[in-house]
């Protein structure tokens, strides 16, 4: 069954942000969660690791597994 929603988070994000992502997983249908290592909430920012975010977005939009 395909994933309709992609939830991306960094393991260095604030605890309340990570809790919010967990809560969304409980109520959203067919959600795939990816936790990126070594980044926080601004992972897609140039100061973060945008290549990791881009990789996961390409996988999601191409129908790759999560």
Image (spheres, grey):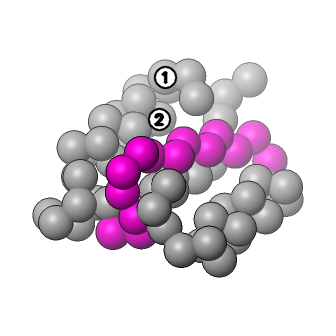
8 inside magenta stretch: no
Residue 26: give x, y in percent of width and height.
84, 55
Q: Residue at x 62, y 72 (%)?
A: 15
In the visual, does 39 lie left or right of 33? left
Determine which quarter of the picture holds residue 40. Answer: bottom left
Picture layout, residue 10 above or below residue 32: below
Vertical placement of 39 versus 56: above or below?
below
- Other residues around mark 1 within 10 Å, as few (<14) / some (14–19) / many (≥20): few
Quarter placement of the N terminus: top right
Task: Please name the residue that numbered disc 2 is placed on.
Answer: 60
Q: Quadrant of the C terminus?
A: top right
Q: Secondary structure at mark 2?
A: helix
User: Which stretch appears magenta?
Assistant: 29-42
Residue at 85%, 59% (x, y): give it: 27
User: From the viewer's perspective, is 17 left or right of 55?
Assistant: right
Indicate yes or no whether the magenta region holds residue 32: yes
Residue at x-position 32% and y-position 60%:
43
Q: Residues within 10 Å of mark 2 (few under 14, many from 20)?
A: some
Q: Which mark is residue 64?
A: 1
Q: Is residue 4 visible?
A: no
Please state the horizontal and vertical placement of residue 3, each as a whole percent of the image.
Answer: 65, 35
Mark 2 and mark 1 in contact (Cβ < 8 Å)? yes
Q: How far apart are the two marked residues, 1 and 2, measured between alpha carbons?
A: 5 Å
In-front residue for pair 22/60: 22
Residue 51 coordinates in the image, percent (x, y)? 22, 44
């Amino acid at each position: 069954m395909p994933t309709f929603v992609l939830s991306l988070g960094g393991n260095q994000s604030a605890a309340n942000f990570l809790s919010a992502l967990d809560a969304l997983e409980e109520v959203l249908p067919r959600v795939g969660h990816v936790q990126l290592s070594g980044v926080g909430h601004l992972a897609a920012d140039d100061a973060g690791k945008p290549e990791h975010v881009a990789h996961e977005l390409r996988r999601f939009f191409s129908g790759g597994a999560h």
